[in-house]
Amino acid sequence: MEGFHQSPNIYASEVNIKVKDLDNALTFYQNIMGFKVLEKTDKKAVLTTDGKTPLVMLEQPENVIAKEEHMSGLYHFAILLPSRADLSVFLRHFLGTGYGLGAADHYVSEALYITDPDGNGIEVYRDRPSNEWTWKNGLVDMATVELDGNSILAESDAEWTGLPSGTIMGHIHLHVGDLQKAEEFYTKGLGFNIVSYYPQAVFLSTGGYHHHIAINTWQGIGAKTPPKNSVGLNWYTLVFPDEGARESAIERLNQLGASVEKEADYYVTSDPSGNQIRLK
């Protein structure tokens, strides 16, 4: 970990995911993914890896409905492991569960792709050292090529004991209906920089990371906001380095015409496609 997920950067720290059956989802997130339960009620569960920091919240809404196609919302949330050895241990464990997975080498990282029982996307990845990333004209070189799974498996033969305590929320990747409007919201409003382009997708970060947020129109241009009781993303959290940085972002969002509401110790806004964000 190189400090891309701490001050002075802006980064995602927690996601709230809606599921159809909380108990069924918990079985997957605990036994298959390796999270620990921090708190639980009948309809909500807070998941952690270090026993104190919330990373993922699962919530079962009233009259919940299945995820629909061609909607904005979550493409995946991405769990960043501390090391390649940790990815090795996770991969060996996951292959033994019988669940399907995808995989890719992105030059900057090595990634596994998983879908939970409700169709919510999850990425589990490790970063290559940033001095191995290639930048040109302010953009980082990323691609999607075949992952060397055997090399990863050879990295460690340690026993699986769940996700390591140093695991953090690495980034979040979202479906949007209008790429240009979303790009304006995240850059001019929230203060992110564009660091890479991909067909129908934009990658954004602060502090020279390969991406803290990605947005795409892969569910179709004009993809609608899903119903509130639909499986999928409920909200995610962005952490600002200090109150001044958050206030500046709120002022910029207001200038763009975005709604920002105060709630408890955070503010709530939504991107132009209805993806809700808590500003902390």
Image (cartoon, grey):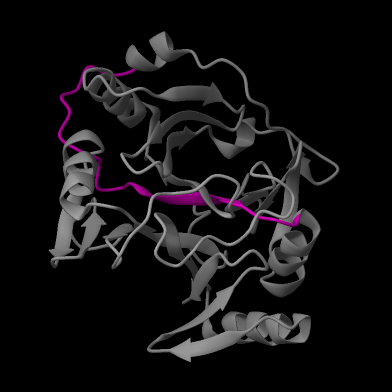
Residue 161 within the magenta-colored segment of the rendering: yes
Give the residue displayed 14% in from the left and 64% down from the top.
Answer: 40
User: Is 193 or 44 nearer to us in this picture?
Assistant: 44
Give the residue displayed 38% in from the left and 89% down from the top.
Answer: 264
Q: State the image coordinates of residue 154 (x, y, percent, origin top left).
A: 33, 11
Relative to 242, residue 204 above or below: above
Q: State the image coordinates of residue 255 (x, y, percent, origin top left).
A: 77, 86
Residue 269 within the magenta-colored segment of the rendering: no
* Position of residue 142 in the picture relative to residue 88 (left or right): right
Q: State the image coordinates of residue 214 (x, y, percent, origin top left).
A: 63, 49
Q: State the image coordinates of residue 166 (x, y, percent, origin top left).
A: 30, 48
Relative to 98, residue 167 above or below: below
The answer to whether residue 1 shows anywhere in this view is no
* Position of residue 170 in the picture relative to residue 271 (left or right): left
Q: Give the dominant element type of the magenta stretch: helix, strand or loop.
A: loop
Q: Quadrant of residue 73?
A: bottom right
* Position of residue 201 in the picture relative to residue 153 (left or right): right
The answer to whether residue 111 shows anywhere in this view is yes
Relative to 45, residue 92 above or below: above
Give the residue displayed 35% in from the left and 28% down from the top.
Answer: 87
Q: Quadrant of residue 199?
A: top right
Question: Where are the magenta residues, as a range?
Answer: 155-178
Q: Quadrant of the N terminus?
A: top left
Relative to 226, residue 189 above or below: below
